[in-house]
Image (cartoon, rainbow, N blue to C red):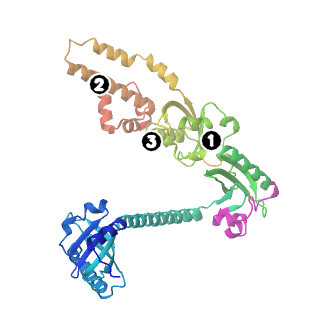
Amino acid sequence: MAVDWDAAALVGLLAKVADISFVLDRDGGITELASDGGELAAHIDHHWLGRSLLDTVAGDSRQRLAGVLAAALANPAVAQRIDLVHTLEDGASLPVEYRLAALPDGGGVIAVGRDMRPVASLRQQLLNAQQALEQDYWRLRQVETRYRQLFDMIADAILVVDAGSGRTLEANPAAGELLGGGGQRVVGKPFPLGLSERSQRDVAGLLGEAQATGRALLSGVTRAVDDAPLSAVVSYLRQGTETRFLVRLARESADGAGGDEQSLPSSLQRAPDAVLLTDTDGRVLAANKTFLDLAQVLSDDRVIGLSADRWLGRSGVDLSVLLSNLNERGSVKLFSTVLRGDGGVNTDVEISACTLEDAPRGRLAFYIRDVSRRVSDGQASGENLPASIEQITRRVGRLPLKELVRESTDIIEAMCIRAALELTQDNRASAAELLGLSRQSLYAKLRRYDISGVETDAISS
């Protein structure tokens, strides 16, 4: 039975199941159009009627569309597929996937389209995610490469031990040489290994202490092969559900400089005043808990190896003055300065320091006392500045404001110069640096304000 095809009705029916439907004549002209009324209808309106579908695509797609039209007309039994990108009037691109089939009467072609923008958006998101993953991958590879190079360059033995199983996960070449057997034989073995039986028990206890406190140190550890003395430092690390021990083993030098020399006695660890042990360059070797509290640091491994001027002094000048005086005199008493905490809190302190003469290498001990309460009380009852300002305010009405401001500025400037000379123990060069002045400018101001009570030439020469 012959079917009476109504092209408009057929297009309307197909539009219910597709996003867009066309009836095209044999040359590609649009004779019927229907859409689902969704977002696509806002871009493809009935003003397309009468136009050629070939005119709605870019030049490189016209030949493909013309070929598909010809194939659909030549083989009515087979639907032809083609992906097209329409160029809209506002310059936007509209990707659509079409199925083309010849009408039964052979008078044209019906095209059923599906909006591919959601698919294109997903593809773009997938591409962006893939590019981001590749960038992260290469960034991690670079970080791992730097980590490996640094890990292998460290002279001390470094091991990463799993806290759950007790097995060594990573070990640098120095660990293999120190503990014997090479790095590959160390990895995967239970830790501690390569140590004497007594030292293995001591280090096992050290791991437990580090797990409880976060960090633990032990000296006097000995190797199994030759009883060579070692020092051990263990840090406990947690990341998510994984826990690790970071173990550093270092040889103790024959003069004993590798162990107790760089640690404080328990009495100083519990001292109410801050205690700092440094080398002759001011690099921190040990610090007690009071110093860590004032410096707002969680553990001493955050300060060891760093220069003390990171925390001590208003600038690098204060530590330089201290080191210079310790080098010349061997001791310094009641040096007033500030201790700068990592959290931004500055504390007024007094420092007494001395050279440890019995140490095999140059070592300096700093005893730091918090005097912030004492200083604030003293400032509240001070007489110089308030009295001077009071004298100036009494002259209001008798002198112009400009002269009053100039006098008050001179008073404050003179007081700052005196304070700088006191802080630097009368060292003119250091005082000039502390004030941000040249030495010549400082000399001129000393003469201007007749500051001759301090013996400024005692050290500067």
Q: Residues within 10 Å of mark 3 (few under 14, many from 20)?
A: some
Residue 333 visible in this rendered orientation of the protein? no
Q: Give the residue type that dot 1 points to.
A: Leu
Q: CA distance from mark 3 to mark 1?
A: 23 Å
Q: Residue furthest front?
A: 1
Mark 2 and mark 3: span between their CA atoms?
27 Å
**Residue 316: mark in rendering:** 3
Q: Which residues are magenta?
A: 169-198
- Which of the two labelled residues, at mark 3 and mark 1, occupies the earlier sequence position? 3
Q: Distance between the Cα atoms at labels 2 and 1?
A: 44 Å
Q: Left or right of 61: which side holds 379?
A: right
- Is residue 176 within the magenta segment? yes
Asked whether the residues under the numbered discs 2 and 3 touch, taking CB atoms below 8 Å apart as contact, a structural biologist would say no
SS category of the residue bearing label 1: loop
* Residue 172 drawn at (x, y percent): 63, 64
Whether residue 32 is visible here, answered yes or no, is: yes
Location of residue 42 in the rendering, given as x and y in whole percent from the top left corner: 26, 60
At 52% from the left and 22% from the top, the residue drawn is: 374
Please, what is the three-letter code of the amino acid marked with disc 3?
Answer: Gly
Q: As displayed, is residue 113 above or below residue 201?
A: below
User: Is residue 105 toward the left or the right of residue 322 in the image?
Assistant: left
Give the amino acid type for the residue marked by disc 2 in the picture.
Asp
Q: Nearer the viewer, residue 2 or 276?
A: 2
User: What is the residue that sits farthest to the bottom in this orientation?
Assistant: 74
Judging by the rendered image, the residue that carries numbered circle 1 is: 356
Q: Is residue 17 magenta?
A: no
Q: Residues within 10 Å of mark 1 (few under 14, many from 20)?
A: some
Corner quadrant of residue 413: top left
